[in-house]
């Protein structure tokens, strides 16, 4: 029996890995979206996912879950509701301040915007299912914009 070269052994491991543990289909698309956003001339920082909880499905087959993100002193709570092929996000930002929230689906440009109310509440309706991230842009131009990590609806 002959010994395998290092390259031949690594090729076997790669083949087994690709067959039994392939990357998720949306991974390349999601990473391209993240890279495109990072390469933009805007100062973008990611929020940290702190908590995710799931609620029971509703009577009509709709589902809802809650996400919580934290970035510095800003806390973002999201309630994501899915009903059929579309979804809705209700959000609360603490502490409340004038901001615009933009929903970015994959690499598509922001198509859904909301302005945060005086109480810190906003809503985004008729969102497509799939990968989504929220970009939060403070109206105070001295504060940089930041974004949530991509999450799936």
Image (cartoon, helix red, strand yellow):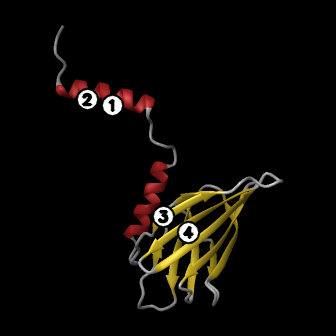
Front-lying residue, 63 or 18: 63
Q: Is residue 61 left or right of residue 141?
A: right
Task: Tell which tag, 3 or 1, sits nearer the viewer.
Answer: 3
- Indicate the secondary structure of the residue bearing disc 2: helix
The one of 99 and 50 positioned closer to us in this rendering? 50
The C terminus, quarter of image: bottom right
- Single out the mark in the foreground, 2 or 4: 2
Crowd around label 2: few <14 · some 14–19 · many ≥20 (10 Å): few
The answer to which of marks 3 and 4 sits earlier in the sequence is 3
- Which residue lies at the image location 67% right of the left edge and 60% below the top edge? 128
Q: Nearer the viewer, residue 146 or 31?
A: 146
Give the number of the disc on residue 49.
3
**Mark-to-mark CA distance, 4 and 1:** 36 Å
Q: Say above or below: 67 vs 102.
A: above
Using residue 54 as the reference point, say whether residue 71 is left or right of it: left
Viewport quadrant of the N terminus: top left
Report if the CB atoms under discs 2 and 1 are less than 8 Å apart. yes
Residue 52 placement (x, y as % from top left): 56, 59
What residue is pinned by disc 4? 109
Q: Could you tell which of marks 4 and 1 lies nearer the N-terminus?
A: 1
């Amino acid at each position: 029996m002959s010994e395998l070269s290092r390259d031949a052994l690594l090729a076997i491991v790669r083949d087994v890995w690709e067959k039994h543990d392939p990357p998720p289909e949306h991974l390349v698309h999601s990473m391209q979206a993240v890279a495109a956003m990072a390469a933009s001339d805007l100062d973008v920082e990611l929020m940290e996912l702190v908590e995710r909880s799931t609620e029971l499905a509703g009577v009509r087959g709709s589902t809802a879950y809650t996400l919580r993100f934290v970035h510095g002193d800003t806390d973002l709570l999201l309630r994501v509701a899915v009903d059929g092929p579309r979804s809705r996000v209700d959000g609360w930002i603490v502490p409340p301040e004038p901001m615009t929230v933009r929903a970015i689906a994959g690499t598509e440009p922001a198509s859904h915007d909301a302005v945060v109310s005086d109480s810190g509440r906003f809503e985004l309706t008729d969102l497509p299912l799939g990968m989504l991230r929220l970009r939060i842009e403070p109206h105070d131009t001295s504060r940089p914009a930041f974004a949530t990590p991509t999450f799936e609806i």
